[in-house]
Amino acid sequence: MCGIVGIVSQNPVNQAIYDALMVLQHRGQDAAGIVTVDDEDRFRLRKANGLVSDVFQQVHMTRLQGNAGIGHVRYPTAGSSSVSEAQPFYVNSPYGLTLVHNGNLTNSAELKDKLFKLARRHVNTNSDSEALLNILAYHLDQTTQDPLSAQEIFTAIRATNEDICGAYACIAMIIGHGLVAFRDPNGIRPLVLGKREENGRTEYMFASESVALDTVGFEFVRDVQPGEAIYVTFDGELYAEQCAKESKLCPCIFEYVYFARPDSTIDGVSVYAARVRMGEYLGQKIAHEWKDENIDVVIPVPETSNDIALRIAYVLNKPYRQGFVKNRYVGRTFIMPGQTQRVSAVRRKLNTISTEFKDKNVLLVDDSIVRGTTSKQIVDMARSAGAKKIYFASAAPEIRYPNVYGIDMPTKHELIAYGREVNEIARLIGVDKLIFQDLNSLIISVQQENPAIREFDASVFTGQYVTGDITQDYLDKIAAQRNDSAKKKREKDATNLEIHNER
């Protein structure tokens, strides 16, 4: 789960890409990168570990010249958190090609082998995004026309779609040509298209969420469709074509629960409206199943659950209070790369308003419970603040299975709900009572905004993977590759792999 952006303009795009990445920061806090193409057809790249505001100083922005560019904020899953795996990635053939990727490929090991033996291309990192870039480069290199036509680019995307599996929303930039954005045939990861008129010409922008378009003054046009590729030349000509043999819209339902900003619209669904409905359905369930419980106050765990908790309070006719104050300068704990970091960050991130807890029966509302680490610490804080009883409501169902499409839920044994019933989970996180949203209610909450979505990737709840290629052997392999100790080793090994960068 990362954030990506791409812009073709008549004016310098460095500031616009920076601003877009700032509002996509919630999608990745590990690293950031921008690449532009200058008036001499040279890529200008800056990428590093850290937040957007830390990575890009004035000296870097000055060097990132050009009227077209792409950007990325990273949250690592398949690779390590080494700077060598920060995006964008670059290859010099054909023409000069750079790419940003949100998602995760499920056949990256096979791709790397194919690239080396068939294409004679070397992948220097553990990143599946670098493998994806080289697969695309290989297929573009099979074309004969110079310059490339839109049809030849679409032909290369079709071949790439046949080679790769998993979840991917990508934006690539080709020297001398333009930007091409494409999305996996299941539409698991989001990607939107925007435009604006400047001096009688149309400029285009792609981004992971519509809020990025709003921030830099682009009008939302539509979502990139599953399996679709959209090519925009540096002169502003737009071409679009379906590039997958079969496609269907199966967006990741966790985008609406947790990842996306509430002011975004993804695949025709207002994230805010979906979360309000989640609160409506969960509130009704609480009213039915806990009608004998004396709840004094409803308190959200900020901030993704605020809208959900407010609606629950309305349904229950109970006071809604802000019991936690969030330090906005601490990143999202769920997406931090190590368990130690996640634990230590919770106390830095939240502090209690003790008067809202003292001598009260408190209903805490959170968007989800993943590992349970954060939930237990929050419950302990509420106890220390004087709460008599603590009830806990999760706006998402029990997360029992690993995610393989770009979310860091690598092994079932790290998930607190795996193999456990609700009462046991409640005991482990230290609450008096615990309730989860029903999966059907969650689906309806999102689907009501866009009934055309007939299916979701809800694999973390069901264990059913929409790509149909996930075996137990694969799950065992990623569990071994992505646990905290394995990530630390890869990061150490990859420390000095960086090849180029704008300092």
Image: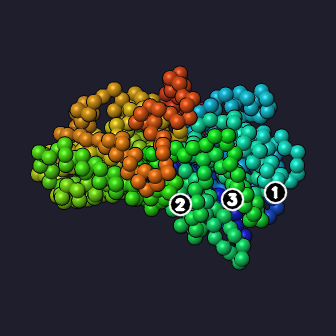
How far from the left and from the top, in percent, is residue 58?
A: 62, 65
Q: Which residue is pictured at 38% across the width and 32% down the height?
A: 400
Residue 233 seen in the current view: yes
Considering depth in this image, is 253 or 177 the residue closer to the camera?
253
In this rendering, would 280 be left or right of 128? left
Residue displayed at 25% across by 54% down: 312
Label 1 sits on a secondary structure element that is loop
Res 428 label: none
Left/right of residue 29 with respect to residue 63 in the rendered view: left
Q: Amino acid at mark 1?
A: Gly
The disc, 2 or 3, on the residue closer to the chain's N-terminal end is 3
Count every numbered label the image shows and give the total.
3
**Closest to the observer: 487 or 279?**
279
Would you say the residues marked 1 and 3 are in contact, meaning their CB atoms lie under 8 Å apart?
Answer: no
Position in image of residue 147 (x %, y %): 86, 53
Question: What residue sits right under mark 3 in the picture?
Answer: 69
Quadrant for residue 206, please give it.
Answer: bottom right
Q: Quadrant of residue 40?
A: bottom right
**Helix, strand or loop for disc 2:** helix
**Residue 176 has which mark?**
1
Q: Which residue is mark 2?
A: 210
Q: In the image, what residue type sits under mark 3?
A: Gly
Image spot of residue 54 (x, y percent): 54, 57
Quick one: label 1 or label 3, which is nearer the N terminus? 3
Q: Residue at x 67, y 42 (%)?
A: 244
Residue 374 location (% of width, % of height):
33, 42
- Work out which residue is located at the far bottom of the displayed protein and give it: 199
In this picture, residue 315 sits left or right of residue 72? left
Specify few, some or many for label 3: CA neighbours under 10 Å numbering under 14, 14-19, or 20 or more.
many
